[in-house]
Image (spheres, rainbow, N blue to C red):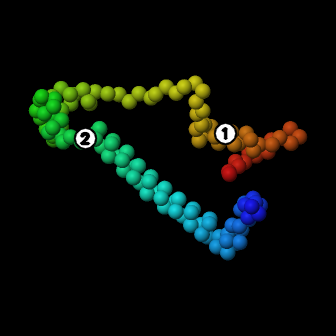
Amino acid sequence: MADRLPRPAPKLRGAQHLAPAVRKHPFLYFGLPLIGILVGGSFALAHLTQTKVDYNSTKVQQMSRDEALAMDGKRKKNFDVREEYFRLQAGSAAEALDDWDMVPVQKPPDTYVPPSPGEMEELLIKASTKVDDGKKKEPKIVRW
């Protein structure tokens, strides 16, 4: 009966038994899993994106111009710029295009209008003229 006695439980070391291995080969425990997750995630996202594109392409189909016109039930005439130009020149539309006047647009009241060159010169003369003892000096224009 002595050989049936319970044995003491082994001590749980936790992560202590990994410490020497991690110190020896840190890339195997940290770098390799990280690279594996990145590469695997890239392939998974590529697959999901392709699935999304395939699904959306089934919804929208590109139609040729002839197919679109056939759906309308009408066969429309092709547009030619030269024909349209001559049609406008021949009709009364040409007269209407030439009947116009240039009218200035009214500006809003809060819009800043810069002074004209003559007004600017007067403002600069006033700003540069200094009065000493009631005598007026010859005005000189300050240019910046």
Amino acid carrying label 1: it is Glu
Checking the image for residue 61, the label placed there is: 2
Q: CA distance from mark 2 to mark 1?
A: 69 Å
- Nearest to N terminus: mark 2 or mark 1: 2
Tell me which residue sits at (44%, 29%) in the image.
104
* Left or right of residue 116: residue 99: left
Tell me which residue sits at (44%, 54%) in the image.
44
127 up-or-down from 107: above or below? below
Q: Nearer the viewer, residue 81 or 127?
A: 81
Q: Which residue is mark 1?
A: 122
Tell me which residue sits at (16%, 29%) in the image.
72
Mark toward the viewer: 2 or 1: 2
Which quadrant of the figure has residue 127?
top right
Q: Which SS class for mark 2?
A: loop
Q: Which SS class for mark 1?
A: helix
Amino acid carrying label 2: it is Gln
Q: Quadrant of the N terminus?
A: bottom right
Label tally: 2
Residues tagged 2 and 1 counted as in contact (Cβ below 8 A): no
Q: Nearer the viewer, residue 72 or 8?
A: 8
Q: Position of residue 74 (x, y in %)?
A: 12, 29
* Left or right of residue 55: residue 29: right
Q: Position of residue 85 (x, y in %)?
A: 18, 37
